[in-house]
């Protein structure tokens, strides 16, 4: 039904994604995996086989900026984002009402210097208990430990604005406004122990000019971040993203 492929001339690796139907009505994804395993082994393949109807069980993490969370929930609620969202985790209570309005369980896990280890333990227990396939940091403003990053390797996506590393810390849009930036952008990437340096899945920009106020820059940034993160989550949940060392291949 659909097929894409890419051969990387630098690494010599070959990537392929195939979407197919079978004429055998009783066949299952499990039986297909079992049948294909000897072939994959012979060619030393790294492979996955998912039912096209399977939905990635997705846990969303958020702090006090809710635009990405709201966008993901809206897309999920309208059926345009084919995932299941069994839980939302936050270190604040700001968006409990939003989670409640979508019927999603909200887990408040406060984080301080003294409670960080316990908070991460609770997070990993949720990932395990809820059989989570994907964790999305939708403007979650806590740095995950190296241990958590490695446990979630290849299945945790983060979003950040395009001002890094130029404008770090508090109020990056105020800093950008003061320096007269002309482009507002966002990057969605896999989470790694190297802060904001994981393999990039998607990026986008919007042009701004001298007439934009700080509030208009912030609003533009929110729109770009929401678009970029939703694309990254959709492509990952459709198994279109494949890790290629420090990069990814997106077959769409």
Image (cartoon, grey):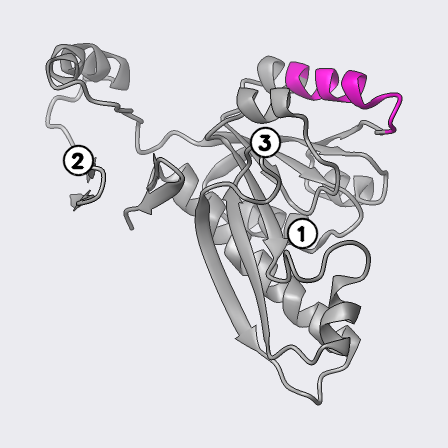
Where residue 20 appears, x then y in whole percent? 17, 35
The first of marks 2 and 3 along the sequence is 2
59 relative to 223, above or below: above
Neighbour tally class for label 1: few under 14, some 14-19, many 20 plus, Cα within 10 Å: some
Tell me if 212 is positioned left or right of 249 in this view.
right
Q: Quadrant of residue 37?
A: top left
Q: Report helix, strand or loop for mark 1.
A: helix
Give the magenta-colored segment's residue range. 112-125
The first of marks 1 and 3 along the sequence is 1
What residue sits right under mark 2 in the picture?
20
> Can residue 80 be seen at all in this image of the molecule?
no
Residue appearing at x 85%, y 44% in the figure: 94
Task: Please check the rendered image and state whether residue 84 is part of the magenta-colored stretch, yes or no.
Answer: no
- Which mark is nearer the camera, 1 or 3? 3
Residues at badges 2 and 3 in contact (C-beta under 8 Å)?
A: no
Q: Report helix, strand or loop for mark 2.
A: loop
What residue sits right under mark 1 in the picture?
70
Q: Quadrant of residue 214?
A: bottom right
Where residue 174 appears, x then y in whole percent? 79, 70
* Numbered badge on residue 9: none
Neighbour tally class for label 2: few under 14, some 14-19, many 20 plus, Cα within 10 Å: few
What residue sits right under mark 3 in the picture?
193
Q: Nearer the viewer, residue 222 or 74?
A: 222
Residue appearing at x 33%, y 42% in the figure: 240
> Can residue 70 be seen at all in this image of the molecule?
yes
């Amino acid at each position: 039904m659909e097929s894409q492929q890419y051969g990387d001339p630098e690494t010599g690796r070959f990537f392929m994604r195939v979407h197919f139907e079978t004429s055998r009505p009783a066949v299952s994804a499990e039986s297909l995996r079992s049948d294909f395993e000897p072939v994959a082994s012979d060619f030393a393949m790294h492979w996955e086989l998912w039912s096209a109807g399977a939905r990635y069980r997705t846990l969303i993490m958020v702090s006090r900026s809710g635009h990405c969370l709201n966008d993901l929930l809206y897309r999920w609620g309208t059926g345009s984002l084919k995932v299941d969202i069994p839980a939302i985790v936050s270190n604040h209570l700001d968006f409990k009402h939003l989670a409640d309005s979508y019927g999603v369980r909200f887990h408040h896990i406060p984080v301080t210097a003294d409670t960080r280890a316990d908070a991460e333990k609770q997070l990993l227990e949720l990932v395990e208990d809820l059989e989570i396939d994907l964790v999305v940091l939708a403007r979650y403003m806590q740095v995950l430990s190296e241990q958590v990053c490695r446990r979630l390797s290849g299945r945790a996506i983060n979003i950040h604005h395009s001002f890094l590393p130029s404008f770090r810390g508090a109020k990056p849009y105020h800093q950008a406004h003061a320096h007269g930036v002309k482009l507002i952008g966002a990057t969605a990437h896999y989470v790694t122990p190297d802060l904001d340096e994981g393999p990039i899945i998607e990026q986008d920009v919007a042009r701004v000019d001298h007439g934009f106020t700080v509030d208009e820059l912030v609003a533009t940034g929110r729109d770009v971040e929401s678009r970029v993160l939703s694309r990254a989550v959709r492509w990952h949940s459709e198994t279109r993203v494949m890790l290629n060392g420090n990069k990814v291949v997106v077959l769409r």
